[in-house]
Amino acid sequence: MIVLGMMSGTSTDGIDAVVVKFENAKSPNGAPSFEILKHVSLPFAPALREEILACVRSDTGAVDRICALNFDLGETYANAALHAVRQTGLEPFQIDLIGNHGQTVWHIPRHSTLQIGSPAVIAERTGITTISNFRSRDIAAGGHGAPMVAFVDQLLFGDEILNRGLQNIGGIANVTFLPAGHPERSFAFDSGPGNVLIDDAVRRATGGAMEFDADGKIAARGAVNESLLNEWMAHPFLREQPPKTTGRETFGTPFGAEVWTSAMTQGVSSDDLIASLTMFTAKSIAASYRDFLPVMPDEIIASGGGAKNPTLLSMLQMECGSSTRVRRIDEFGIPADAKEALAFAILAYETWHGRPSNLPAATGARHPVIQGDITPGRNAQFSFRAR
Ligand SMILES: Nc1ncnc2c1ncn2[C@@H]1O[C@H](COP(=O)(O)OP(=O)(O)O)[C@@H](O)[C@H]1O
Ligand SMILES: [Mg+2]
């Protein structure tokens, strides 16, 4: 099977798409064997990005805007999918399945969640059967609907000897802990902000000319302001027990505005603010290991756009201490920004085969569930049977 996975996260930077070829045989631990044929990252057009940012806030996200955005994003995902297929040198009819995460508009832990980007539009434009809305079924079963990637992490990265942490740093940071020899006992949670506050401050500091701190250069030249850092480290989310999830509802633009105003009134330079926010991400991640993991991991495998920020990764290494080795997922043959898109290709593949793909230990659900809504494409041939 050839499956296309797409992810667009809280950073609202754009769409990561991967085309993955699965072999029918499974490896001994049950992991599907696959090959990444292509990975593309497509930034959102600035106007679309502004519209998304308006729609993910309770003060500006009106129902008419969200209704329109659902279909506009469907078109954008369809175009991204077709682009990725062409880049792979394939035709759409050669793709068996699309797994699309969609854009999160709102998330109420253990109650409800809303990812949009109409799968009807995607299936109609591409002709490819599309699986979407992965998180809802887990929530219906009493879970948080997140983190979804934990299932994929334990399949691909469980190790006999090393205690590993799979650390994704997107807009929000989330970790999957894989105990040595017992990947089935893995659990996962969101530790707090990833890049979201750094991006917000960079946009304010540059009047929108820069979207993020490219290669961590600003943070590297700034100095960490300890009093701001201590204030943020007292945020109640950091003390909540896992399973826990967070998003722009807590660490979004309104929080960024508060942080900016308080730094500017205290005379903190924008470079120092960005350095402090970068340290906040690193320190809150490392603190979450100490507070909530049974042991400090031997190895951290970092992914997401934040893994491309060397200042952030070296702060994380420093905060973890020398007995934990911080590595990038690229060393394992998976591009850092393709990881989550790959995860949704694998989740779609599992659903298509009638297999559950949530990890109740990670999400808090009462039982395993087969995830996602299936929208038939022109290629659909149904013989679906849950196993
Ligand atoms: N070269 C880079 N240097 C520093 N940060 C980067 C770089 N490339 C990407 N990023 C960060 O990664 C973010 C996107 O990460 P991503 O994993 O796509 O998050 P999400 O899943 O939330 O969309 C960007 O907003 C930016 O903050
Ligand atoms: Mg992204």
Image: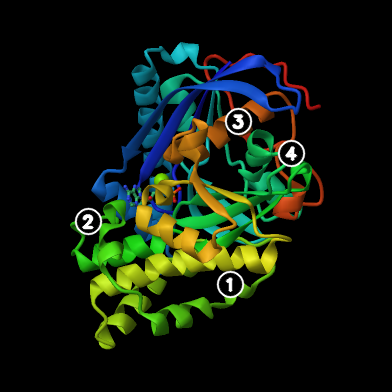
Expressed as whole percent of the image width and height from the top left, the position of residue 86 reads: 35, 18
- Quarter that holds the N terminus: top right
**Sequence order check: which comes first, mark 4 or mark 2?**
4
How far separated are the C-alphas under marks 1 and 2?
29 Å
Expressed as whole percent of the image width and height from the top left, the position of residue 201 reads: 30, 67
**Sequence order check: which comes first, mark 3 or mark 4?**
4
Q: Mark 4 points at which residue?
A: 160
Q: Residues within 10 Å of mark 2 (few under 14, many from 20)?
A: some
Q: Mark 3 points at which residue?
A: 346
Expressed as whole percent of the image width and height from the top left, the position of residue 135 reads: 62, 46
Q: Quadrant of residue 376?
A: top right
Q: Is mark 1 within 8 Å of ligand 1?
A: no
Q: Which residue is drawn at 31% across and 50% down?
A: 49
Which mark is on residue 237? 1
**Sequence order check: which comes first, mark 4 or mark 1?**
4
How far separated are the C-alphas under marks 1 and 3?
30 Å
Kind of residue sitting beneath label 3: Ile
Q: Name the residue under label 2.
A: 210
How far separated are the C-alphas under marks 3 and 4?
23 Å
Return the residue found at the far front: 322
Q: Quadrant of residue 80?
A: top left
Asked if 173 appears above or below 327 in the picture, the reply is: below
Which mark is on residue 311? none
Kind of residue sitting beneath label 2: Met
Kind of residue sitting beneath label 1: Phe
**Sequence order check: which comes first, mark 1 or mark 3?**
1
How far separated are the C-alphas under marks 4 and 2?
43 Å
